[in-house]
Image (cartoon, rainbow, N blue to C red):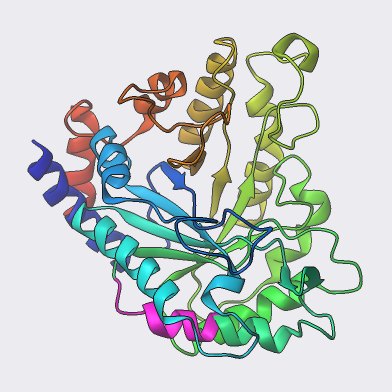
Amino acid sequence: MKNLFIIVLSLSLCWVKAYPQTSILPFGVSLCGAEFGTESLPGLYNKNYIYPQKSEINYFADKGVSLMQLPFRWERVQHQLYAPLDVQEVARIKKFLTDCANTGVMVVLNMHNFARYKMNGQEYIIGSNEVPLKAFKDVWKKLAQELKPFNNIYGLDIMNEPHDMGAYSWFNIAQETINTIRQVNKEVAIMIEGESYSNAVNWNIFNDRLKYLQDPNDNIVYNAHCYFDNDNSGRYQLSFDQENINARTGVQKVKPFIDWLKVNGKRGFVGEFGVPKNDSRWLPVLDNFLKYLTANNISGSYWAAGQWWKSYPLSLHPVAGNDQPQMTVYAKYLQNPATNPALAMNNRVVALR
């Protein structure tokens, strides 16, 4: 049955490649580790940071996850601005892509830098004198060229959660980067997050101008993040009762982003969401949220998983081989033909269009 799933998914991947504007992405998971250790950049591999192992990919693929996000740091793929890409770091990204391809999984690559680059312990905003826009375009042109042969890259997410940009225009940065990537890759989707940490609840306030971004290949996907705590941070520092949550909180928080997509005829993705495992009352909130996304033909990626998430309350990573509580809800929305025959039939129909 697993082999059948991989064959069906492979056909679906071909369809996604051919019809990017009408495809609906499956739900995914962010596999973390490569973006860890920000106090030590570039840091030492296997000490300050890691990359996901094949066993982790296999676990989630067996659950029906057919899209995985890989967060990574700019400072590790390019130790100095304008320098050649680090061969070892790029090799680690390529190994992850290959492992995912061999398991029938698509990938979104996510530069996890919050619109900054760290030098000598100090972060500088893209567009500043220290980190010119030209430098950001340089790294993405090199990455897009280097990774172009991989057919299982669904999207290049140019930057995770830009915020507090001050005088530097995130719109201009995004537009220039789209233009640069298209010089070397005209097929891959380009994913654009928004200012104010790409928050779904205030997307139309901080990011309405992004609807004017132009892509000569018309393949932009807008990526918002949505957490259900009161400050929308995903830290969940208060208890369920203190947060004053109800079963529809997730729906209410993501609705402004989905409404914006509908009004402007744009494609979207919710690249981060998650709930704590320490109170089962969060699970219906997650369920209603996922049901609402599905009803609106929007998917997303759970935040997060990875073997170094030891005590992280949102972690979807299995412990001693046992599923986390959130997986009981999330599994219902994953594309697993072994457990959901309707999804298997849907994949066959889609692939044959």
Q: Residue at 59% of width from left, 16% of height from top?
A: 282
Q: Main secondary structure of the magenta part?
A: helix
Q: Residue at 82% of width from left, 73% of height from top?
A: 169
Which residue ends up furthest to the right in the rendered image? 167
Q: Visible in this render: residue 261? A: yes
Q: Which residues are magenta?
A: 140-150
List x then y, in percent, for residue 266: 58, 57
Quadrant location of the N terminus in the rendered image: top left
Viewer-closest of 211 and 28: 28
Q: Is residue 263 above or below residue 142?
A: above
Q: Residue at 75% of width from left, 78% of height from top?
A: 172
Quadrant location of the C terminus in the rendered image: bottom left
Viewer-closest of 83 and 256: 83
Tell whether position 286 is magenta. Answer: no
Q: Is residue 265 left or right of residue 291?
A: right
List x then y, in percent, for residue 121: 77, 68
